[in-house]
Image: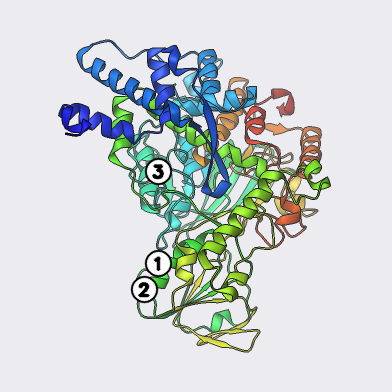
Amino acid sequence: MSVLEELSAEDQRAVEAIDGADVNVLRLALLQITGDAALAGMKVVKTPARGGVLEADTLAVEHHAEVRRAALDYIRKSRISSAETPPPPSREKAYELMKTFSAGDISPEELRFGYEELAFEDFPRQVNWQGKPPADVIADFEVLIIGAGISGVALGVTLNQLGIPYTILERHEGLGGTWWINDYPDCRVDITSYSYQFKFEKKYPWSEYYSSRDETLKYVQHVADKHDIASHVNFGSEVVSATWVEAEAKWHVATKDAHGVERIWVANVLISAAGLFATPKLPEIAGIETFEGAIFHTTQWDHDFDYRGKKVGLIGNGSTGSQLMPGIAQAASELTIFQRTAQWVMPAENYRDALPADVSWLIENIPFYWNWLCYSTFSTTCRLQELQEYDRAWQANGGTISQRNDKLRANLLKYIESKVGDAPELHNKLLPRFAPLGRRSVVDNGWYEALRRENVTLSTENITRITPKGIETSDGKHHDLDMLILAAGFHASRYLWPIKYVGRDGVTLEEVWAKDGPRSYLGMTLPGFPNFFIMYGPNGQPRAGGFFSWAEIWTRYILALITKMIESRSSSVEVRREVFDDYNREMDEEMKNLIWENEAKGSYFLNEFGRMAINLPWRAEKYHAMVESPDLADFELR
């Protein structure tokens, strides 16, 4: 008779779920609940994940049985005892627990960031009035937001709590932003679901380790419905221009709808939540307009076109192209991928897998398991930051980037070898010429296996032109095609384009940014454009952490300034020029320690001037400290 057969049905279910738990997460939840000192002194080790891109804090195997026994004991006792779950720990106690969770030292900045990711409070990043003004003062204030994606929803949730009137202008007919427009086959996130979520929405029942596009869109819409965001959205409104009117201290925003009807909106504050990946980029290839088959960008997928049994061409092999390619390969009669740059395509455990029911059981039956699961995914993703940095001492001794980055390169080369090593010609085409993480990393969705199919061709020749019937490459070959997929990405470095923004004294953003591309202060604002904020602005992409969390953090910073503006009866708020200039000088200096400006040539990371205009140079925990709350001395309130 097995051990399970000796247990009651309830205990059997508990044991099955506990056996599938993240044991370190389980340990911390139990330690927090019970205070059992025996759980505190256990050995924790760093375990590579995703081919070495990440490192997870995992409990040494010798402690697993003890933790599982403690978990079963807790479950049994909780059935017969009416003892209430203890309240969340104090911040200081939570810091101790985070240190216990980790295999290494944690800086004070990491602890502060991590505490918010634990999400013990209902709204970990809530904004509160410091001296709430009369209702009529608040009612007379208007915030205008461009974009009803993740950032727009985050703003709306907090504005609702504060009672500040707002309107969201959304050019599409639904909420969701990038998850509304990207509905190509096999579209999904490349960060785990418990990292890619709001921290004020607790215990959402994710069904996949990495949520699909449909599940992610459903989640965003669920949060929007719960907080009545849609009633504030004006759908089908494409913003054409935004002009600051000094005499009124207000923004005038021009929109047009699908019928060409124009309207002017007036607001005290304007916030762009349009995002980085908003405007599709079409490849500039001669003859593209002559192609007679089906042709579309991945954000404009034609679901009426049946590509089964057709000859399909795919331009682009980045995150999107490599993600959708395997599914297309299975259905098409022929698939030709036109590759300009070989990418580091990296493994990701459980990438297409459903989350087992055990996870939901643990979340419902072990208090705080959800909190520590969220923290675990957060702390794991933060470990990739070391890979983005030069180690000058390592380089002086003959290394390429750093010990970890060079080791990752070796591991990934072995991974490629294991997939296509017996096909030398294909293998050579797939070897990247830049360091891992020099560009955005690409998750293996079956990329290498699909390339082995007889109906799949990888072309690395330059495209000469597109013809009515297909593509001609520099080797003189013509590839006959029925369908052409453009996975060419977005105009990421052309921030806020094509909207025309006009600030103080009639100066446009294009003029301000003409020297070396878009710049901002903290990725959120700039001088000369009062009362204007950007979510995910120039050099605003953090080096780690989930986007939903960053949307909350930016929201907190921006709305802290707006509430201060209303409380002080100020008509405008604007970052000081000297603060902006000092910040950008420091940013440029810090950027020299990162790999991108040398390793990311040709990618969307670098703008036309060769400058990194997307990512931040500081580690995520340092940037979090910089934007935890605004320093009013950095701004001029009028």
Please tell me how crowded label 2 is: few (under 14), some (14-19), or many (20+) other residues with Cα within 10 Å: some
Q: Amino acid at mark 2?
A: Ala
Q: Residue at x 83, y 46 (%)?
A: 396
Which residue is denoted by mark 3 in the rendering?
A: 220
Q: Residues within 10 Å of mark 3 (few under 14, many from 20)?
A: many
**Distance of mark 1 from mark 2, alpha carbons?**
7 Å
Q: Which dot, 3 or 2, sits closer to the camera?
A: 2
Left or right: 81 in relation to 27: left
Up the image or down, 281 lies above or below 529; here it is below
Is residue 133 visible in the rendered image? The answer is no
Point out the tag, 3 or 2, that comes first from the N-terminus. 3
Q: Work out whether mark 1 precedes mark 3 in sequence or the reverse, and give the earlier one.
A: 3
Question: Colour scheme in the image?
Answer: rainbow
| 252 up-or-down from 72: above or below | below
Q: According to the image, label 1 marks what residue?
A: 327
Q: Residue at x 35, y 32 (%)?
A: 203
Q: CA distance from mark 1 to mark 3?
A: 26 Å
User: Amino acid under label 3?
Assistant: Val
Residue picked out by circle 2: 331
Relative to 478, is 323 on the left or the right?
left
> Splitting the image into 4 quarters, where does residue 206 fall?
top left
Q: Residues within 10 Å of mark 1 (few under 14, many from 20)?
A: some
Rendering coords of residue 470 (x, y %): 52, 84
Query: Element under label 1?
Result: helix
In the image, 366 versus 260, the foreground residue is: 366
Q: Amino acid at mark 1?
A: Gly
